C-alpha cells in the first residue's frame, strides 16, 4: 500500500498533467483494477481520486 505522502504526490502529479479530468482517470483505473480482481490497487486509485477532490477544493456552482 502507498503511504499518504505517496498518494498525495501521485494525485498532485496527475492533476498537473491532466487537470480535473485526472479524477475521472483515477476512477477508470480503479474500475479496471477491480475488473482484474486487484482490490488493493483499486482501493489505492480511489484514495488518489479522493485526494484530488480535496486538492480541487469545493465545487463551484
Image (cartoon, rainbow, N blue to C red):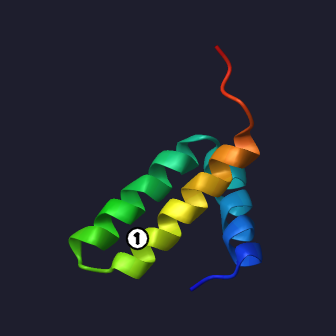
In this view, the residue in front, 11 or 47, is 47
- Relative to 42, residue 16 above or below: above
Is 53 on the left-hand or right-hand side of 21? right
- Relative to 37, residue 11 above or below: above
Is 25 on the left-hand or right-hand side of 9? left
Q: Secondary structure at mark 1?
A: helix
Is 9 on the left-hand or right-hand side of 30? right
Residue at the extreme bottom of the image, as rendered: 1
- How far across and how far down the image is residue 26, in percent? 49, 57
Near mark 1 (Cα within 10 A), the count class, few <14, some 14-19 or many ≥20, is many
- How far across and how far down the image is residue 43, in percent? 45, 70
Figure label count:
1
- The residue positioned 43% from the left and 54% from the top of the image is 27
- How far across and how far down the image is residue 19, in percent? 64, 43
* Residue holding disc 1: 42
- The residue positioned 43% from the left and 77% from the top of the image is 41
Q: Quadrant of residue 37?
A: bottom left
Residue at the extreme top of the image, as rendered: 61
Q: Quadrant of residue 2?
A: bottom right
- How far across and how far down the image is residue 54, in percent? 70, 46
- The residue positioned 42% from the left and 80% from the top of the image is 40
The quadrant of the image that shows the C terminus is top right
- The residue positioned 40% from the left and 70% from the top of the image is 42
Is 6 on the left-hand or right-hand side of 22? right
The quadrant of the image that shows the N terminus is bottom right
Amino acid at each position: 500500500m502507498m503511504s499518504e505522502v505517496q498518494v498525495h504526490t501521485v494525485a498532485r502529479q496527475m492533476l498537473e498533467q491532466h487537470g480535473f479530468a485526472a479524477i475521472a482517470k483515477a476512477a477508470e483505473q480503479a474500475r479496471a483494477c477491480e475488473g482484474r480482481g486487484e482490490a488493493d490497487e483499486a482501493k489505492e486509485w480511489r484514495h488518489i481520486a479522493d485526494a484530488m477532490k480535496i486538492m480541487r477544493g469545493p465545487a463551484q456552482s
